[in-house]
Image (cartoon, rainbow, N blue to C red):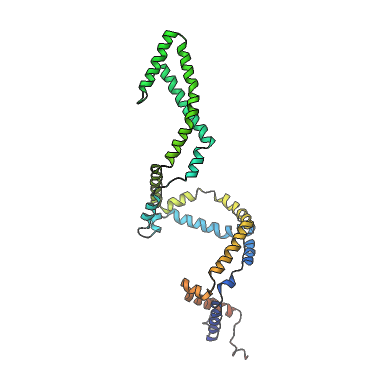
């Protein structure tokens, strides 16, 4: 295409100036935005564009990453990775309400009760039998129970077995009485500063390890995703959410809020603030000149008007 003449450039400059003078708010229309959402969220349309652009783009990016030795921390400016790791390694206290509800749950109580009952039953059986080496802190008690059971068996015949049976019966009562205290101690432990620090330390180490990983490692993990299932499900998920009344109301409310935030702003002032005004103007001239030339643009003097 030949270079655009001065009349065409003047026309394009005038139209661009008129565009820049428009308030941003005139381009924000909640009703039209929801109509556009309905059109864009059509499942067949989503599937088409995802297959045409989304899938090939994803495959190309993963292929490039698979050959890359660039570490994830290389995406960050100097010092940023260290700050992220430091922040990730700070104490991570567990939510008090979550801990209390979890520890007090029937499932946790049942599992704790089963574990304590099994441990105490095994202890009484071994102690009464007198077998095995004494553990630290429990050897004297096991020895005493063993000696008592044997002595009772020799002196009173079957009474020794009865003592063991009674001890076994009392295990259940002891566990029931101790459960509340055990659960409280577990909850206190989970909410302690030591646990909070330990969680932060582990999380910080995990983040540091992740940042040392390469793009190739990331691509390897991404290839494990069942993308065919994701692609098949995505159109229906998007269409479903586009029709949810709560989401549509939120979009409309947010557009109104944005229009309020942008009150007094024009297209030109927004482009200027973004640093895009000269580029936008140049592109307007370039595309406008091409469109006008293709439409048979002639100067008024050439057309004898």
Q: Nearer the viewer, residue 206 or 149?
A: 149
Front residue of 207 and 223:
207
| Among the 4 quarters of the image, the one containing residue 69 | bottom left
Q: Is residue 112 left or right of residue 91?
A: right
Taking the image as shown, residue 85 lies to the left or right of residue 260, namely: left
* 160 versus 197 height, above or below: above
Rendered location of residue 188, percent (x, y) = 43, 39
Residue 130 visible, this angle: no
Residue 213 position, x and y percent, is 40, 51
Q: Is residue 3 above or below residue 240?
A: below
141 vs 26, left or right, is left
Query: Is any part of residue 226 visible from this angle?
Result: yes
Q: Nearer the viewer, residue 77 or 193?
A: 193
Vertical relation: 58 (above or below) 165: below
Using residue 232 as the reference point, say whether residue 199 is left or right of it.
Answer: left
Residue at screen point 49% across, 44% down: 97
Vertical order, 100 against 147 (above or below) = below
Q: Residue at x 62, y 56 (%)?
A: 246
Give the quarter of the image for residue 303. bottom right
Residue at horizontal 44%, vertical 20%? 125
Q: Residue at x 45, y 25 (%)?
A: 120
**Quarter of the C terminus within the rendering:** bottom right
- Find residue 209 and report its horizontal and vertical position in percent: 39, 49
């Amino acid at each position: 295409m030949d270079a655009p003449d001065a009349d065409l450039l003047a026309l394009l400059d005038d139209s661009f100036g008129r565009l820049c003078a428009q308030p941003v708010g005139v381009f924000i229309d909640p009703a039209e935005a929801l109509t556009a959402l309905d059109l864009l969220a059509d499942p067949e349309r989503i599937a088409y564009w995802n297959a045409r652009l989304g899938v090939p783009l994803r495959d190309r990016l993963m292929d490039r990453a698979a050959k890359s030795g660039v570490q994830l921390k290389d995406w960050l400016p100097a010092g940023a990775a260290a700050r992220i790791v430091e922040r990730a390694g700070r104490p991570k206290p567990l939510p008090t309400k979550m801990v209390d509800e979890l520890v007090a749950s029937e499932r946790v109580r049942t599992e704790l009760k089963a574990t304590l009952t099994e441990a105490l039953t095994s202890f009484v059986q071994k102690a009464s039998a007198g077998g095995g080496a004494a553990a630290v802190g429990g050897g004297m008690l096991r020895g005493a129970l063993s000696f008592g059971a044997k002595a009772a068996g020799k002196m009173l015949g079957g009474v020794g077995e009865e003592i063991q049976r009674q001890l076994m019966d009392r295990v259940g009562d002891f566990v029931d009485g101790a459960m509340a205290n055990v659960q409280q101690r577990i909850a206190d432990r989970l909410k302690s500063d030591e646990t909070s620090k330990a969680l932060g330390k582990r999380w910080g180490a995990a983040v540091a390890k992740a940042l040392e990983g390469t793009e190739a490692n990331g691509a390897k993990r991404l290839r494990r995703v069942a993308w065919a299932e994701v692609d098949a499900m995505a159109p229906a998920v998007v269409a479903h959410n586009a029709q949810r009344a709560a989401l549509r109301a939120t979009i409309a409310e947010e557009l109104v809020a944005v229009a309020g935030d942008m009150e007094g702003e024009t297209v030109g002032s927004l482009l200027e603030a973004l640093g895009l005004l000269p580029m936008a103007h140049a592109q307007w001239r370039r595309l406008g000149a091409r469109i006008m030339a293709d439409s048979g643009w002639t100067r008024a003097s050439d057309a004898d008007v």
